[in-house]
Image (tube, rainbow, N blue to C red):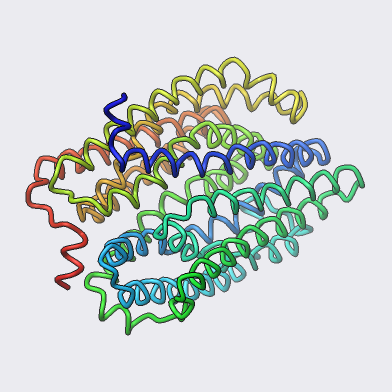
Amino acid sequence: MKRWFSDGVFRTIVRNASYLASGKIGGALLGLIALACAGRGMTPALFGTLVLIHSYANGVGAVVKFQTWQFIVRYGAPALERGDTAILRDVTGFAVGLDLASGLIGLAGGLLLLPHAAGWFGIGAENLNMAMLYCTLIPTMTAATPTGVLRVFDRFDQIALQQLVTPLVRAFGAALSYLCGFGFTGFVLTWYIADLSGDLCLWALSIRELRRRRMTDALRPGLFGPARRLSGAWGFVWTTNVAHSIWAAWGPVSNLVVGALLTPAAAGLFKIAATFFDSASKPAELLSRSFYPEIMRLDPSSRHPWQLAVRSALISGAIAVVVLLIVSIGGEPVIDLVFGKRYVEAYDLLQLMTASLVVAMAAFPLESLLYMAGRERSALVAEGTAALGYAVLLVVLIHLFGLWGAGLAYVAGVCLKTAFMLVPTLSAYRGRHALPHGGQAEAAA
């Protein structure tokens, strides 16, 4: 282990993950306060409706969202290493253009679809106006450019700071709504304002960082001009868009399906279990966010990035085992304390879902390795196939086992994704000697 930390890149990955963890831990605690106030301040049915409204907007955003932060890291990190600010300006301008276009398309599509789909998803006609209002967040939800800017400049401390904004505003507003009895409307507005505040803060931090580097013109949107100067840009963004749209929609769409096939109250229970699962798997997500920018600066034909992946996976898997024990022992008392006895049923579902925790956390480097190796399409096929299998299992198992079946499908989906990602990753490793260095490839282009 001492030898691992003698590696400067590995230390950077852990350091940046620690920055993100500091924000996420505080955010998780504040998020629990917000959910506790909402769970106790509304009936299970209304709490589930709030979850469904948020999930609908989030789901539409996930479907249309381009992973522009990955594009900025993929093309911008090598350019920054070479000191090529012209390429970096093209990269960020292209990303802003994509965010604007996808956000407006998502907003229009979400508003047009909602009146027809609300009843099927379990959103009653009396709550339709609230759901329509929430859809106006889709353009800010889909924007990933500011995250990419801060990551490529290694400002993970700023990202950690921003991660506290949404949960802090949400916790304050939820407590106020609970104590003052503002009811369902108060909680929906709280969620809305909190999401908007976090998104705007992220933009403000990225603009400040660009201004500090005298590059504010890098946010001037552009599509076709920058794309002509960036070899393979459209192929990369479309591939990552489809792959991540499929998988990012996992959570929101799962909530909507559970609400449609069962009840809004069941969707609320599933949301509570999924929230605890997501919180438990945060260490892997944080390592992934730090891991990807660092390996994009390395030569994929060498053993170095692959060794970093194994070390990071082992650390993440070890953390998963500890978290699994903590959740098994303390999950039920925490749910009882935070949400009340009427939500304790979510603990049984959580126990089932945490069976896949070790797999999910240990497998986090796989996707980043595929992008580093230029195997974006392999990642797309893996995620698409796994998501399709999960969707089929979700519907079938809910019909067979009810809410318990949703948990079984979740576990199966995580395992399918890992298996389908592992095969092309091993293939890329075996053929690593033929892989071009990202920075060299861009320079040649």
Image point (45%, 23%), residue name: 355
- Across and down, in percent, residue 202 comes to 57, 61
Q: Extreme right residue here? A: 180
- Across and down, in percent, residue 305 comes to 23, 43
Image point (20%, 38%), residue name: 423
Give the camera-side residue of 439 and 172. 439
Give the camera-side residue of 96 and 263. 96
Q: Quarter-wise, where is residue 419 in the image?
A: top left
In the image, taking residue 345 as reference, residue 393 lies left or right, namely left
Image point (42%, 55%), residue name: 154
- Across and down, in percent, residue 432 comes to 11, 46
In the image, taking residue 382 as reference, residue 165 lies left or right, namely right
Give the camera-side residue of 133 and 213. 213
- Across and down, in percent, residue 101 comes to 47, 76
Give the camera-side residue of 155 and 168. 155
Q: Quarter-wise, where is residue 255 in the image?
A: top right
How many numbered marks are there?
0
In the image, taking residue 391 as reference, residue 350 lies left or right, namely right
Quadrant of the drawing holding the C terminus:
bottom left
Q: Is residue 254 placed above or below 374 in the rendered structure? A: above
Q: Extreme bottom residue here? A: 225
Quadrant of the drawing holding the N terminus:
top left
